[in-house]
Amino acid sequence: MLKKVVLVTGSSSGIGRATILKFAKEGYDVVINYHHNEASANALKEMVEKQYNIDAMVIKADVSSEDEVKTMIKTIVDKYSKLDVLVNNAGIVFDRSFEEITVEEFKRTLDVDVLGTFIVSREASKYMPNGSAIVNVSSTNGTKTISPECLDYNIAKIGVQSLTRDLAYQFRPNIRVNAIAPGWVDTKMNKDLPKDYIESENEKIYLSRFAKPEEIANTIFFLASEEASYINGEIINIDGGY
Ligand code: NAD
């Protein structure tokens, strides 16, 4: 039987990297997509191939570029002939106030987070067999948190949730589409947060800490797996209670 194949966008770091490690551990062949960090992507490929005896592939593509995404999907299909799981993880945020954020920055966040999810899903879905799954990475910024310092991100992550429901309908009954909405996760996205701010946020989180990327990857894997075979079009918060 052919092995299952997963593509995780933006997977040279953070949640995407942890997701690649989880799927590799479970025996999937993995496709690592990166935009900036080739060295980290290649190191991850080497590591999973050695550790888990699976096949890994590294592809550079900007998820907001239709041409680059088309080339990425063609490269995957040429090698594996199909794609069983897509994780739309790539995302950016500009931590800027209402007054500071530029129109270009606002547009860029929407391009990567929302349009990127749309483009990769549309192109990948052409090669996803019946029973496959897409998991989108949204955020609690799209469900319950009010963060005026990143309004580009808030609306982008609401967009990802809306798109999740639309794609679940569009791809019915062959491909399940769900989203996760993590709260604070300990990744490089939050590396510049002041220590006292982290402490004050930890006080609001019922579990008193940020999530580890692996804890998010576990839920992504569950949603993509047969164990979640009747979950479709849903948004799952993963925020430790907030
Ligand atoms: P991260 O910065 O480590 O990961 C984001 C990845 O996306 C990076 O590898 C980056 O290079 C990649 N990327 C950026 N633009 C891209 C593009 N145009 N094309 C392809 N890849 C691109 O941070 P993370 O926390 O692991 O973020 C992963 C996802 O989780 C993001 O969608 C983020 O919004 C979401 N998220 C993070 C948190 C958190 O607290 N860290 C909370 C909720 C949701």
Image (tube, rainbow, N blue to C red):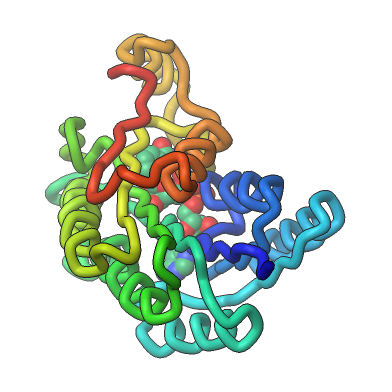
Q: Residue furthest right?
A: 50
Q: Position of residue 92 (x, y in %)?
A: 37, 56
Q: Position of residue 48 (x, y in %)?
A: 76, 55
Above or below residue 240? Residue 148 is below
Image point (40%, 89%), residue name:
67
Quadrant for the N terminus, please: bottom right
Q: Is residue 124 left or right of residue 181?
A: right
Image point (43%, 87%), residue name:
70
The answer to which quarter of the image holds residue 156 is bottom left
The answer to which quarter of the image holds residue 122 is bottom left
Above or below residue 107? Residue 157 is above
Above or below residue 63? Residue 8 is above
- Asked whether residue 28 is in view, the answer is yes
Q: Position of residue 59 (x, y in %)?
A: 60, 76
Q: Is residue 40 left or right of residue 169?
A: right
Image point (44%, 79%), residue name:
127
Quadrant for the C terminus, please: top left
- In the image shown, does 58 or 30 lie closer to the viewer? 30
Q: Residue furthest front?
A: 1
- Asked whether residue 189 is in view, the answer is no
The mark total stands at 0
Image point (31%, 47%), residue name:
179
Q: Position of residue 78 (x, y in %)?
A: 60, 88
